[in-house]
Amino acid sequence: GAVVSQHPSWVICKSGTSVKIECRSLDFQATTMFWYRQFPKQSLMLMATSNEGSKATYEQGVEKDKFLINHASLTLSTLTVTSAHPEDSSFYICSARALAGTTDTQYFGPGTRLTVL
Amino acid sequence: SQQGEEDPQALSIQEGENATMNCSYKTSINNLQWYRQNSGRGLVHLILIRSNEREKHSGRLRVTLDTSKKSSSLLITASRAADTASYFCAPNRDDKIIFGKGTRLHILP
């Protein structure tokens, strides 16, 4: 099946610093990628939809200036958490939508655990 | 966008028994997907069923879809300890996936 990778798998940073998370579709092209955030024992919350070559679409309540998304190519999207604070500590998961004929499937990355001290 | 709602929220069964989880949604869909998430890990795509299909099998998994009732079920037969995870359904209309709370399945030894 299609593979999506994320890098890094975990990161610890100091409050006030910025952290970049990469999401790559390894064996397929993805015109659309999605970023989710998951707090402990909760479901995944969609943060934004990222389309290659255009601006991301953010969900209500998600600060676009804090969570910068860049989708520079058909295989790479990045999420940058700017001026991170402890409340940004979470599990960040990306997904990439693959088009297979007339059926599209979202494949998820393994996630990145962010801890802000 | 679509959101699926899974039922029950939590399920504990003995190893070897069958586990059934249900999903309801509200509007029309093109397909419905089921995902599994082990604790602290990413999501694994289990199975996709199209809107014109009523039942689909994959190994120990059996998925049904009733578009008239806007519901789906996931059956895991002969459960194993490794099936312990959270399961999410994803009704899809070629749009973004909004996840429900999922079903937390716990397989007892």
Image: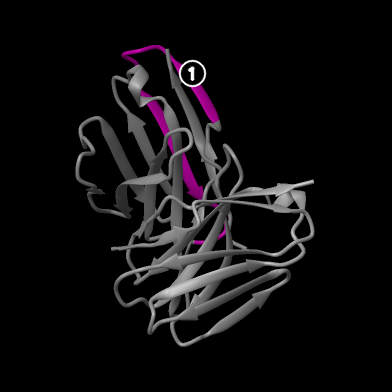
**Amino acid on which the number 1 mark rests in the picture:** Ile
> Which colour assignment does the render follow?
one colour
* Residue B54 pos. (x, y %): 52, 85
Q: Chain of mark 1?
A: A
Quadrant into which the N terminus of chain B falls: bottom left
Q: In this rendering, would B78 be left or right of A4?
A: right
Residue B45 visible in rendering:
yes
Residue A75 visible in rendering:
no
Picture residue at 35% right of the left edge, 13% below the top: A15
Picture residue at 53% right of the left edge, 63% below the top: B34
* Residue A55 pos. (x, y %): 22, 49
For label 1, the SS is strand
Q: What is the number of callouts on the image?
A: 1
Picture residue at 40% right of the left edge, 54% below the top: B100
* Residue B57 pos. (x, y %): 66, 77
* Residue projecting furthest to the bottom: B52
Q: In this rendering, would A72 be left or right of B57?
A: left
The residue lying toward the viewer, choosing from A2 and A88, is A88
Vertical arrangement, residue A15 with respect to residue A75, above or below: above
Q: Quadrant of the rendered structure where residue B38 is?
A: top right
Vertical arrangement, residue A10 with respect to residue B77, above or below: above
**Residue A18 colored magenta?**
yes
Q: Quadrant of the rendered structure where residue B67 is?
A: bottom left
Give the residue at mark 1: A12
Vertical arrangement, residue A99 with respect to residue A57, above or below: below
Picture residue at 49% right of the left edge, 51% below the top: B9
Give the magenta range. A10-28
The residue lying toward the viewer, choosing from B47 and B109, is B109
**Residue A65 colored magenta?**
no
Q: Quadrant of the rendered structure where residue A84 is?
A: top left
* Residue B52 pos. (x, y %): 46, 87
Q: Residues within 10 Å of mark 1 (few under 14, many from 20)?
A: few
